Image: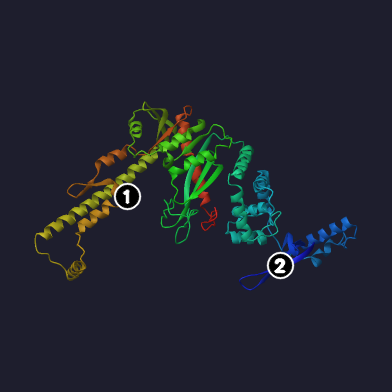
Amino acid sequence: MYLRTTQRRNKDGSVVRYVQVAHNRKVDGVTHAEVLLNLGREDTLDRDGLTRLVASINRYLGEPAPAALPADAAHLVGDHLRVTESRPMGTVHLLDGLWRMLGVDDALRKALGPRRFTTDVERVLFALVANRCVDPMSKLSAAEWATCDAAIPGLASMDDDQAYRAMDVLIEADAQAKVQEAVFFAVANLLNLEVDVLLFDTTSTYFERDTEETGDAAFRLYGHSKDHRKDLPQIVIGLAVTKEGIPVRCWCWPGNTTDVTVLPQVKDSMRDWRLGRVVTVVDRGFSSEDNLAYLRRAGGHYIAGERMRNGSPLVEAALSRQGRYSQVRDNLRVKEVRLDAAPDRRWVICHNPAEAERDKTQRDTALEHIRVELERIKALRDRATKTSTKPAVMTPAERARKTTATASGKPVEPAHVKAECALRDHPAYGRWVKQQPSGRLVIDRAKVTAEERLDGKYLLSTSDPDLSAEDIALGYKNLLEAERGFRDLKSDLFQLKCRISRL
């Protein structure tokens, strides 16, 4: 066993030397150096620590210890010692204590099994997590941070390749999410959580690359982007949280995965988690009849948002049912409805007066803009009709544009036709107009009346026979906790340019 040094040349030409504890092992008659411990960079080496190690070895061997400074020589420290390096350790030390208190280290070692690695994978993973909490960086910068800037207990140094390999090993070893399960139940026990409501939602995140991946294992694919970047490949991320917002488990799917297809997989993967009776809360994108029936397997229940404009007979019947609202909060009233056509399903209409006023104001503003635009289109049409009945007097510029359009073979569209097309295709105003058989646009009064009925409302359904209407409404509003988790995920703590090609 001996000390050895290795070196690495940086891009700027400087050379960094590292110190390692190694010993030689013969394999098939060939001697190989096996690294037992990385002591870090030579210029930042803890020489006092090595001195103490030598003294400890000497004591064990019965050899005399090297001479030390006398006890009364404290005043000489300034002359004989100098500070070579300083690293903050308070935050990392606290995180390491929480890491061990929650049993993350034991869960990781259990998942990794008896395999031996030249680097402690658990410590590398902790370093990555600590970096995300303290100073979020890329894997390359995080490795340098853990080696040079932070004091990671049990980890002298690491590089970005070790970070990537540790992530790959974890993904391979924990395909059944046993680490997530162990960590969640440790948190639930520590915080005395009662997991009776499970909130689930999905989001997407995109990658700055030219094309999507190809092949059977392709993951970064084009799909419906919740970041409004349909031009870039993406992945889909699912997150389940408790009603307090504590994460339970996360999932990752290819970018072309749709919300309606993931719920059975989520339900099946949580089957062995010993959660007991759980009510799953999902948004409108997951509330297909097949998904809701799947959530009821094994005695489970659901609270689901319903699409109010899909023309479903049950939805129309629930919305048209008369009844009084009960006040839950200043901005929330609820009304429960039961339908003979669906006796095992309860419906709750929620009404937010402030949101209703906002919907009305936005609609009135849009309708006023449409009225002004329709008047302008009418004036353009009348002008075009008058000019078509008498010789047109055009300016030289107008005559040149007409000659160019005629020569190119493109029909010259009147100004009022262009304006009508722009209004009809407008993403905000087009929904409020309809086209008559004559081709003219008018305000769709039936659509306006139908939307007035829905101002400030959203519709929920549940299979749970015991929850009160108030609990159903508040349980659904807790989906904001999952959305808050996604906001945290997509903040500075989340790196878009991450490496997941081997997931």
Q: Is residue 462 left or right of residue 123?
A: left
Front residue of 131 and 169: 169
Residue 330 position (above or below residue 135): above
Residue placed farthest to the left in the image? 390
Colour scheme: rainbow
In x, y percent, where is residue 304? 44, 36
Q: Is residue 391 above or below residue 12?
A: above
Image position of 223 (left or right of 412): right
Q: Nearer the viewer, mark 1 or mark 2?
A: 2
The quadrant in which the N terminus is found is bottom right
> Which residue extends farthest bottom?
13
Q: Kindly tell me whether residue 473 is visible in this rendering.
A: no
Q: Disc 1 to disc 2, how far (Cα)?
A: 64 Å
Quick one: which residue is furthest to the front in this view? Answer: 28
The crowding category of the residue bearing disc 2, from other C-alpha atoms within 10 Å (few below 14, some 14 to 19, many at least 20), is few
Q: Residue 456: image x %, image y %?
A: 37, 39
Q: Nearer the viewer, residue 169 or 493?
A: 169
Mark 1 neighbour class, 10 Å CA radius: few under 14, some 14 to 19, many 20 or more? few
- Identify which amino acid the numbered label 1 is placed on: Ala
Viewer-side residue, 80 vs 336:
336
Element assignment for label 2: strand
Visible in this render: residue 321? yes
Q: Which residue is tagged 2?
A: 6
Q: Secondary structure at mark 1?
A: loop
Q: Which numbered circle lies on residue 428?
A: 1
Please, what is the three-letter code of the amino acid marked with disc 2?
Thr
Left or right: 156 as drawn, with respect to 293: right
Horizontally, residue 313 falls left or right of residue 206, namely left
